[in-house]
Amino acid sequence: MEQRLTSPGAVRLQIMGPLRVWHGDAEVDAGPRQQRCLLALLAARAGRPIGMGDLIDLLWGAEPPASAVNVIHKYMGVLRRLLEPGLPLRCDGSFITRGDGGYRFTAGPESLDLVAFRQLAARAREEAGRGDAERALDHFLAALRRCAGTAGDGLADSAGATAVFGGIDGEFVDAAVAGAAVAAALGRPAAVLTPLRLAARIGRLHEPVYAALMTALSRSGHQAEAIEAYRSIRERLADDLGIGPGPDLREAYRQVLNRAPEPAAGHPDRQVEKAPGPVPLVPPAQLPPGHPMFVGRSYELRVLQDLVRSMRDARRTSPMVIAVDGMGGVGKSTIVAHVAHLVAGDFTDGQLFLDLRGHEGEDGSVPAAEALRSLLYGLGLHAPDLPDTFGALVGAYRTLTAGKRILVMLDDVRDASQVRPLLPNSPDSLVLITSRRPLIGLAASDGARLFRAHVPDLAEARELFVTRLAGLRGRAGADVDAGVLDEIIELCGRLPLALASLAARLSVQPRSSPATVAAELRDGAQRLAAFPAGPGVLDPRTAFSWSYRQLSPAAARLFRLLSVASAPGVTLQACAGLAGQELPPTKAQLEELTEAALVAEHDSGRFSSHPLVRAYAEELLRGAEPDTEQRAAVTRLLQYYAHSSFNAQVVLAPNRTPIAPAPAPAGVVPARPATHREAIAWFADHREVLKDAVRIAADRGHGIVAWQLAITMEQHFEWHGLFRDWEEVMRVALGAARDSGDAVGEAHMLRSLAGARWFCGAHHESRDLLAAALRLYADHGLLLEQALTHINLHAVRTALGEHDRALEHAETAVALSGGDERPEIRGLDCKGRSLTRLGHYEQAALVLEQALDRNLAVGRRHEEAMIRVSIARNLVGLGRAGEAVRELRRAVEAARSVGQGPYHFEAFRSLSELLIETGDPAGARDAFERADAVLRSFQGGGPRHMRAGLRRLADRLSPAGDLR
């Protein structure tokens, strides 16, 4: 049979303790329980063949199933590929081979802990026989460290398997007793305390190991623990076997009672180090219970478990510290406790837990000295043995945790200084921390791994809520309207504490319905009242208050003011305007709020709060700030947006420079984009915020004219195909202008709204809106606005096929421009376009050439794109298709350079049509795909009539419609 060899060193197995398998540094799942038992039995007999009959007896005992042989064959195949991924079928591989009447497991000391243990123990006994006690003890200790607990822990189902694993335990216990004798002879009894304690837990009735443990404890200064060890073994012998201690155990006890700590043998000047007190034979198990309805959080669990696995790095010299931070109520403690329970079995010396009450600040949280005393109690130290000074407490804790595999969970940590003295003195230990703030100092000085917990996604939040509803008094979540559930979840911002609180409320208030709860949550000002509160109830308001109380006065004020900011978030500069202060203090306050997890900073540079945190801040604002200050803050923020938007729009050089807002109040320093690219980016980053600002200005004023802010956004909406947003904003501002009796503002909004409706194909509506605007402009003698409106009417008449009327509007626009180049150039372009539509190609060429020349002189690229599209259409009419193609390519580049989406689309679409006519299907297809990509970038995939036109073009390119 072909054999495929792989490096045995790539795989490591542990059977001296719970069965575990690693590929390199990554632990792998060894499969179902019976399969793991088979692997453990093979490893326990490493180097010796086991026949099929013996394997059946070991796995099932006297009553094996009829399929036993087939099951073992199947397991063997799976185990071979588990140990050597990629191993071909029917190949033995390096670890499991067949021959000599059975299966043989072969592994070296680098792959199997049992082989390493046996080799080291054998060397230790050889060294001891030669009289080299120091080297013997070193080898004994190295061997004993290979054991992590009872062999084959929990896997045996037969007397035979129990005996096999018991034999390994016996080897360890015997080695521990032998090592203890060598350590005693050298005067180093403390060196073997950890393995002796483990041996005593494994050999619960093994008198020699208890005698050795008592002797080592007594000589190390742990008299009380030595006496406790004798008491426990004596009671166990009496209860389980009905006998008393044997002579060796009684003699060890007599020596404990009569012995004081002695100088180390052979070292009269070296005293045995006195440990700080007894350590319990039963390891501490202080973890809080896991939540019975824990669900989801798969990403967090995966990340945290991967971090725990990384502590197997042999180069570690300190404990693995993992600190999870996040806002109040996000579920940090629940997640960390769940992880702690998942990995607790790996920490055979126990688990400690402390709630450090960090939310109560420096005055109310647990001092480090008090925390140390609690941890030392957990490790078995009694009150009379506790040291007096802080330094001595730290030393005692480090001594008792040295070399241990212990898990410490520290919940609600205030800062790094509170937790640093509580880190155990062992690279094999794990510390799991939760905190409101990221413990950056602990990461910098102690190598802590930091992880921020966020609210779950909608699917996991729904699972959490439905599970709680179903688990509390059996109320099923499945019978609740899914839309109502999702609305509740989103109104709660997917915060686990909030969802758990509402589920509990619904379970104890049968008359409350999810629909009622949703209605209460919709009231933003009273949203937090929907959550049950009272003694012993942790509701969102209480959780947030713990963080709020620790803020500096300035940061607390900014936190309250942020409740008036738009939900999409605010930038640093906007925050400064909101607070009416300079940038440096604002930045420091935002950093404080971010560290407290009351505010989150996004990649875009904006800061925002969780919806429930925002509701809490709004409550505080109403209670702490007078109405005048609340209104002043909103005014400052809106003024910031109005002036910043005006500055950005001026850089984009629109046809009509927007009307400057009233002077900004003191403390407002608006943004000033310097380049075309910066202005476009500013509008893109602030689109949602600006929309919200227009609504607020329309509702409450605050010194801002809604239509003046709205009109600055028009060009951004048009160029990026945001036609729905454009219409929505202009309708809001139009209503505000009409309510205030501002006829000029109404005209501006009518004209802008007409543009949005024209792009959406509502040409008749657009025409009527423009006619109304034109009348208002005429009433107020605004010639430039009339010229621009006639240009818009030209586009509408053209779309309606009324080319004679369109030409009249173009000529009127030129006449009304009054020498202003921008409307005049656009009027000439419109005139040339109408002449082309009417078949006057030569006349159109002259007009369009004039428009292009004047445009190039002033360098306005967005008008250049429009004019070149018009020229191309006229060239087609003149029969000069090749020149038309070149003009359209130039139009594409001009539109692309300024991000002018609609004309970018139109240039590509026209180019595709023209290339079809000129017999260039490949070029036409390429232009079509580019037009399609531009249209897809528009809001909602572009207006319906644009999509329909592109589908017709697709039909021309491919009758089968494969490009649609």
Image (spheres, grey):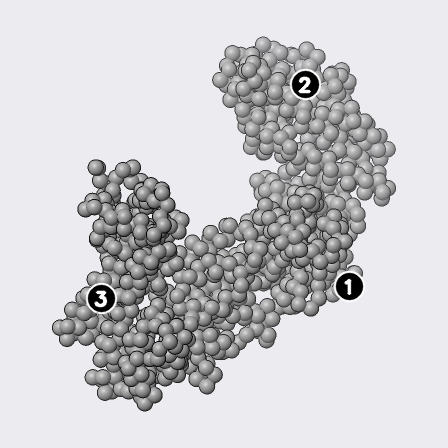
Q: What amino acid type should be assigned to the residue bearing mark 1?
A: Pro
Residue 580 position by quadrant: bottom right
What's the residue at 22%, 79% (across, down)? 186
Q: Nearer the viewer, mark 2 or mark 3?
A: 3
Local crowd at mark 2 within 10 Å, few (<14), some, or many (≥20)? many
What's the residue at 49%, 76% (across, down)? 374
Q: Marks 2/1: CA distance?
A: 61 Å
Q: Which quadrant would the N terminus be assigned to in this image?
A: top left
Asked if residue 386 lies left or right of residue 170, the reply is right
Q: Position of residue 113 (x, y in %)?
A: 28, 59
Local crowd at mark 3 within 10 Å, few (<14), some, or many (≥20)? many
**Would residue 909 be visible to someone looking at this image?**
yes
Numbered marks: total: 3
Say what secondary structure mark 3 lies in.
helix
Residue with the mark numbered 1? 626
What's the residue at 38%, 82% (across, down)? 227
Residue with the mark numbered 2? 832
Tell me the tag on residue 121: 3
Q: Marks 1/3: CA distance?
A: 79 Å
Q: What amino acid type should be assigned to the residue bearing mark 2?
A: Gly
Q: Mark 2 or mark 3: which comes first in sequence? A: 3
Badge 2 vs badge 3, beta-carbon distance below 8 Å: no
The image shows residue 906, relative to residue 727, as above or below, that is above
Local crowd at mark 1 within 10 Å, few (<14), some, or many (≥20)? few
